[in-house]
Amino acid sequence: MSHDDPRRAIARTDVLLATPALAAAAERLGRSTVRAAVTAAQDRARCGEIDPDQVGPAALAALPSRASSLTPVLNATGVVVHTNIGRAPLSAAAVEAVVDAAGYVDVELDLRTGARGRRGAAALEALRQAVPGAGDALVVNNGAAALVLATTALAAGREVVVSRGEMVEIGDGFRLPDLIASTGARLREVGTTNRTHLRDYADAVGDATGCVLKVHPGNFRVEGFVSAVGLDALHDLRRPDGSRVPLVADIGSGLLTHDPALPGEPDAATALREGATLVTASGDKLLGGPQAGLVLGERETVERLRRHPLARALRVDKLTLAALEATLRGASTPVRDALHLTAEDLRPRVEELARAVRRSVVAVEGRVGGGGAPGVPLPGLAVEVPVEVVERLRTPRGEAPVVLARVEDGRGLVDLRCIPADRDADVLHALRVALAGSDPAPDGDDGTGPAAGPAA
Ligand SMILES: *Cc1c(COP(=O)(O)O)cnc(C)c1O
């Protein structure tokens, strides 16, 4: 390197890391992240891409804004429980509870006596109060874990009797037969894909039966010549020695009580009333809480699961317990609110947004999503945008929030169903930025004509 080589002017790594802005960034994001950004910027200066005095600013500009790379997304898809963006958004009460529980917290301590307390007792109490028909409750990591624990504790080395019509793949590789097989239980399939009768179950139940399992196939519907057996008919199946066979109902969606807006969707209270020994469900689908697996049911059977060694490996952390309790005790959840919004509820917000960006309002149907209520449409309204705008809305750029819209029939749709009303201004901002790089609005669309009017 010659004496006048400009690369000599590139500051050393330790000097750069000591500058106030980069030192502050290291406090927030960690030293290794900042060091990597500095090294990359120095490399750019060495190959002449930037001036040596730009190394510091370039490193700063390249740093992520948060320590986690998970990017918050505004859900304008109209799909309420959307698996790819984290299913249920937490309620304000649950978010507050998570923040409070993030530090040291009395999750296993009785503050009055100073003695050890039962882990998560308050969350379990909230569950029991929400479903008075349940003798006891247990919380594990997710719905799949709840099912694994139930079948392991009740049927490892024995048989799980299941209808062929319920041998489902729920999504993301969750295949019921594989899951059951992993517990060491044998699957005893009964009936056919479209029809299963009580006598099919009765014929299959024997000394080797560990439990009967009913699974709610939440992501498809079979129509036509179909029949299935209800819980009420199955709850008194007995082995040859006269003992009752435990009946496990995997309802999946996590509705605790019946919701008239989702007529075909099973709920925990009804399943228990109809005779289920145990109900298993997810915490982050229709319940609208954190990822969790709920087990509700007969006291002795829940206790059997709780005492099983596997339960310790599936236990939830303090953040989940905090969020679950707050979800159950707090006001309505974002999932519930979004599910119950009508097109008329949405109209003022959608029309205002459409007017502001000079686009049309169109009638659309939202979805429950996430493996729940497959046949239930959610009539609503959306702002129509050019398809290419959907990609721009999704791409993180500068300060504009990321908005996930959807494409349907060759149209881009911005659906406000799952957007909190106080974030409409953020959607407008993102939409303005995204539309700025797009074709101008269609001729004659000046924002006062039918384009901004109500849906057809
Ligand atoms: C979603 C679902 C599961 C899996 O629950 P996770 O919380 O995703 O583990 C199991 N069974 C049914 C019926 C479901 O709908």
Image: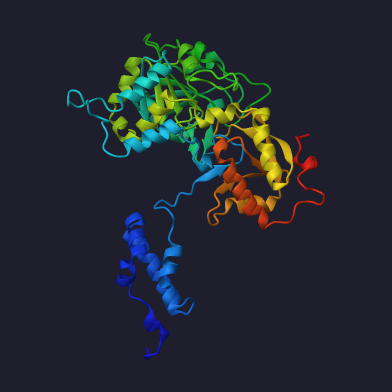
Position of 320 compared to 193: left or right?
Answer: left
Residue 10 place in picture, x, y as percent: 38, 78
Residue 132 place in picture, x, y as percent: 41, 13
Rendered view: 7 above or below 402 = below
Residue at the limit of the structure toward the right, as seen here: 444
Q: Is residue 21 visible?
A: yes
Residue 39 place in picture, x, y as percent: 38, 70
Residue at the (42%, 67%) spot, across then down: 59
Position of 228 compared to 139: left or right?
Answer: right
Rendered view: 275 above or below 449 = above
Colouring scheme, one of rainbow, by chain, secondary structure, one colour: rainbow
Determine the image quadrant of residue 33.
Answer: bottom left
Residue at the limit of the structure toward the left, as seen here: 114
Residue 450 place in picture, x, y as percent: 80, 40
In the picture, the quarter occupied by the N terminus is: bottom left
Q: In the image shown, does 450 or 319 lie closer to the viewer?
A: 450
Determine the image quadrant of residue 77.
Answer: top right
Rendered view: 79 above or below 402 = above
Rendered view: 438 above or below 90 = below
Q: In the image shown, does 54 or 76 lie closer to the viewer?
A: 54
Residue at the (42%, 71%) spot, across then down: 41
Q: Can residue 143 be seen in this view?
A: no
Residue at the limit of the structure toward the front, as seen here: 448
Residue at the (59%, 41%) spot, across then down: 424
In the picture, the quarter occupied by the C terminus is: top right
Residue at the (31%, 27%) spot, across then down: 120
All told, the count of numbered labels is 0
Position of 409 compared to 147: left or right?
Answer: right
